[in-house]
Image: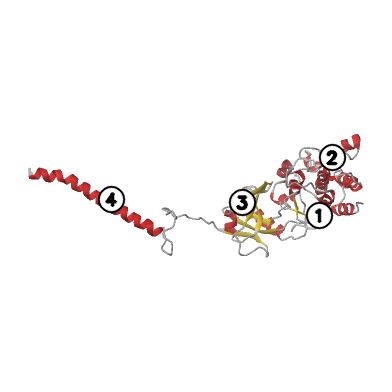
Amino acid sequence: MPDMNRVGCLPRALFSLFCIIYAAIQLLFTKVVNWRTKSSDGRVTNITPVSVPEVKVTLPVRLIFEQEDFPKSCDLSELAQLPKVMLGEGTLGTLFKVVLNCGFIVTARVIRERLVKPEDIEIWINFLGGIRNTWLLPMHVSFWYGGEAFVVYEYLCLGSLEELLHGSEGIQYTPLSWEVRKRIALCAAMAIAFLHTQVTKEGDTLVCGVVKASNILIRTDSSACLSGYETPYLVPPTTIIRRNPGRVAPELTSNQNYPKRFTTKSDVYSFGILLLELITAKRPTVTNLGEYVIEKRKRGGLTGICDPKMGEVKQSMREMIAIAQSCITHNLKDRPSMDRVIQMLQQMKD
């Protein structure tokens, strides 16, 4: 019988031992939590202990191009990882607004993957990034991060002509006046004319490819500058033509003339369409602006052509329509040079 009593007590003893060990573990855990949640002055805080440490993965950055005026305090790896506000989806890639930790606000483009060879990106970004002009949106820096190519530009808070011309009416909506539209047209013309004075290392004249409202960015003084001028050198011409209906010169949309190649004359045509877009406030992707103006003139003159938000029809509006029509003629030889277009815009009477 004594042996049987000892056997009966064994489970109770093990259970008691388990309870003691469990209580000791709980006490130890409580002390650890209290220790982790005390501030430096000994007061207990509301910080929740983290059981698994947070690990921030930073990938290597490889610089492609950098301007001297870009703040050295800005960390490029942080730029690539910071929260971004999407501004638009372009042919070359997605545009974002980024507020850097150093306080600098920039526009960053992430170039589409597999759109162009990495070596071509580096060659053209280095070449075009070194070009500086008042009427071109400057590139600040370009780099590789995690297999993606980033290009960082100056940020302009007013956005693009596309947004201002076709934006939805609301509390903050202000229609573009005719005076502002004339200034934007002249700035864009000077940007294109400047590019036409530049040549590649092979001696070819630089071109814009397609001039469109989303690539005309507006400054706070109502002047404008051209962005996206690197696109024709990083994107196949057929892709650009397909994505920009209504803006491309007819010689590029015909079934002839292979391989497709943008020229200064095709830039002039595209600029003529931009002038008509400024005057009519119609999107060239929806309306054939050349035919629209001809038909409207036959029916009722300029009254039905000009955007009513500009007010009364002026002589300079008639002159700009004439300039635009000279730019979009089908005969390449009859299209004026961009220098001549600038002269005509400057000579408008009012």
Q: Secondary structure at mark 4?
A: helix
Q: CA distance from mark 4 to mark 3?
A: 49 Å
Answer left or right for 29 relative to 39: left
Upstream in the sequence, badge 4 or badge 3? 4
Quadrant assignment, res 167: top right
Quadrant assignment, res 102: bottom right
Name the residue tied to disc 3: 84
Front disc: 4 or 1: 4
Q: CA distance from mark 3 to mark 2?
A: 39 Å
Q: Secondary structure at mark 3?
A: loop
Of 152 and 223, nearer the camera is 223
Upstream in the sequence, badge 3 or badge 1? 3
Q: What is the number of the mark on residue 187?
A: 1
Q: Image point 87% across, 50% down: which residue?
A: 336
User: Against 162, is 124 above or below?
Assistant: below
Quadrant assignment, res 80: bottom right
**Three-letter residue code for mark 4:** Tyr
**Three-letter residue code for mark 1:** Cys
Q: CA distance from mark 2 to mark 4?
A: 85 Å
Q: CA distance from mark 1 to mark 2?
A: 22 Å
As drawn, the residue found furthest toward the top would be 299
Q: Secondary structure at mark 2?
A: helix
Indicate the position of residue 52 as horizontal and vertical percent values. Answer: 42, 53
Indicate the position of residue 98 as horizontal and vertical percent values. Answer: 63, 54
Q: What is the number of the mark on residue 290?
A: 2
Front disc: 3 or 2: 3
Name the residue tied to disc 4: 22
**Three-letter residue code for mark 2:** Gly
As drawn, the residue found furthest toward the front would be 43
**Neighbour class for label 1 at 10 Å: few (<14), some, many (≥20)?**
many
Q: CA distance from mark 4 to mark 1?
A: 78 Å
